[in-house]
């Protein structure tokens, strides 16, 4: 007689293991990392190396202290460290990058039970921690070639910061022209510069072209699902048009900042995003709406970090709200409500299987 096994979900397994999935993510992030080093030079490389090393070492040391198995081989800590590095300016002090990486893997992940048990995206949690603790360092704009300007005004500000402080897309073009990145007053050249990524910003968020290439690779290898990224970008596109009535500004809203990077690499996290198709659609739309609301009326010019983290908190609710339930049938009318002589209402018996 066959044995009966009882256990909690999931009940359907896959031969693809965590190290393979994480390796695919690292491959998708490699072009962005290389481009960041090309743009910003050795400082960007140092931030990447320190962040990854601190994440891997911090997780290993913490698990050693608790006498738990070392899981560095699953590459999840390396992915978290690299994701954090790519959303930091290359001018970030190395000790600060290390602190954020340790916070990401220890506080945001291991404190909740490790990989698969964390509630919030580790890399974004690390960035949010650094943003709240050291806002000046995390909101600085480093120009290609290594020159750094504070993001506190129109001079040397990020494209989103220029618009946030009352500027226009034309002002963004003039800012690019001042640094030789694009001709002034040429809107489409400004958009092209934003798309290619030959402008200042964080290490890995600037090139939309390389982000889309990474997205295509992850979709082909079936590592991520298209629903959350698509609805996150689409919600920003639609809402920005409704608020501005300007198609060019809507395009600017998805090309500037870290929206595309967050949608592809953060909103698709297996642990902190919904597991259902409908839940992912709602998750992405909610993250996009919150992102644009923060951009429009919040204190920060960018809102991707908090948009995704806030929606992370709704993931358990979305998983329970939208799911297919087995063993239930609709309740029929009580027998007393039936007309005399009518047959018994079907489905009364066996309503609970």
Image (spheres, rainbow, N blue to C red):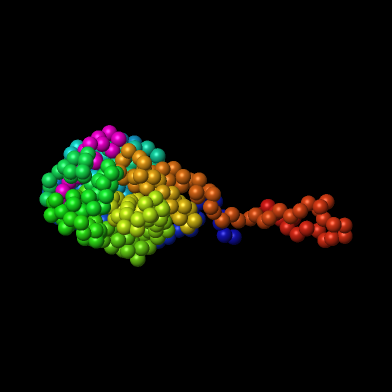
Is residue 259 found left or right of 175 in the rendered image? right
Residue nearest the viewer, comparing 317 with 176? 176
Q: Is residue 79 above or below residue 297?
A: below
Question: In which quadrant will I find the N terminus?
Answer: bottom right
Measuring from the top left, give residue 289's x and y in whole percent.
41, 49
Q: Residue at (36%, 63%) from the top-left corner?
A: 219
Residue 47: which quarter of the image? top left
Residue found at the very far right of the displayed protein: 341
Q: Residue at (24%, 41%) from the top-left corner?
A: 139
Question: In which quadrant will I find the C terminus?
Answer: bottom right
| Residue 31 seen anywhere in this rendered image of the structure | no
Numbered circles on residues, count: 0
Residue found at the very far top of the displayed protein: 133
Measuring from the top left, give residue 37's x and y in whole percent.
16, 53
Q: Is residue 121 above or below residue 251?
A: above
Q: In this view, does 313 lie above or below 269?
A: above
Measuring from the top left, give residue 70's x and y in whole percent.
31, 45
Residue 164: which quarter of the image? top left
| Residue 132 seen anywhere in this rendered image of the structure | yes
Is residue 329 found left or right of 344 in the rendered image? left
Q: Residue at (42%, 46%) from the top-left corner?
A: 311
Residue nearest the viewer, comparing 333 with 208? 208
Q: Residue at (18%, 50%) from the top-left corner?
A: 175
Measuring from the top left, give residue 182's x and y in whole percent.
17, 57
Residue nearest the viewer, comparing 311 with 276? 311
The answer to whether residue 10 is magenta is: no
Question: Magenta region: which residues?
Answer: 131-144
């Amino acid at each position: 007689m066959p044995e009966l096994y009882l256990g909690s979900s999931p009940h359907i397994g896959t031969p693809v293991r965590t190290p393979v999935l994480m390796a695919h993510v690292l491959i998708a992030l490699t072009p962005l990392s290389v481009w960041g080093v090309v743009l910003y030079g050795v400082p960007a490389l140092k931030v990447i190396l320190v962040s990854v090393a601190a994440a891997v070492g911090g997780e290993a040391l913490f698990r050693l202290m608790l006498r738990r198995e070392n899981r560095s081989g699953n590459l999840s800590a390396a992915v978290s460290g690299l994701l954090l590095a790519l959303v930091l300016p290359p001018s970030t002090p190395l000790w600060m990058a290390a602190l954020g990486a340790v916070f990401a893997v220890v506080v945001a992940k291991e404190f909740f039970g490790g990989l698969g048990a964390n509630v919030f995206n580790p890399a974004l949690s690390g960035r949010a921690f650094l943003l709240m603790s050291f806002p000046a360092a995390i909101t600085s704009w480093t120009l290609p070639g290594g020159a750094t300007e504070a993001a506190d005004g129109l001079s040397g500000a990020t494209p989103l910061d220029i618009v946030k402080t009352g500027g226009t897309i034309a002002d963004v073009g003039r800012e690019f022209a001042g640094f030789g990145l694009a001709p002034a007053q040429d809107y489409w050249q400004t958009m092209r510069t934003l798309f290619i990524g030959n402008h200042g910003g964080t290490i890995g968020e600037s090139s939309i072209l390389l982000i889309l290439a990474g997205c295509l690779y992850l979709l082909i290898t079936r590592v991520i699902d298209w629903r959350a990224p698509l609805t996150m970008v689409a919600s920003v596109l639609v809402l920005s048009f409704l608020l501005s009535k300007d198609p060019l500004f809507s395009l600017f809203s998805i090309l500037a900042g870290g929206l595309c990077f967050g949608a592809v690499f953060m909103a698709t996290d297996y642990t902190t995003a919904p597991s259902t198709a409908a839940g992912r659609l709602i998750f992405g739309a909610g993250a996009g709406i919150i992102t644009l609301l923060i951009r429009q009326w919040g204190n920060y010019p960018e809102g991707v970090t908090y948009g995704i983290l806030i929606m992370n908190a709704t993931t358990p609710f979305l998983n329970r709200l939208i799911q297919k339930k087995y063993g239930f049938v609709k309740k029929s009318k009580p027998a007393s409500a039936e007309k005399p002589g009518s047959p018994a209402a079907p489905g009364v018996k066996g309503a609970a299987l």
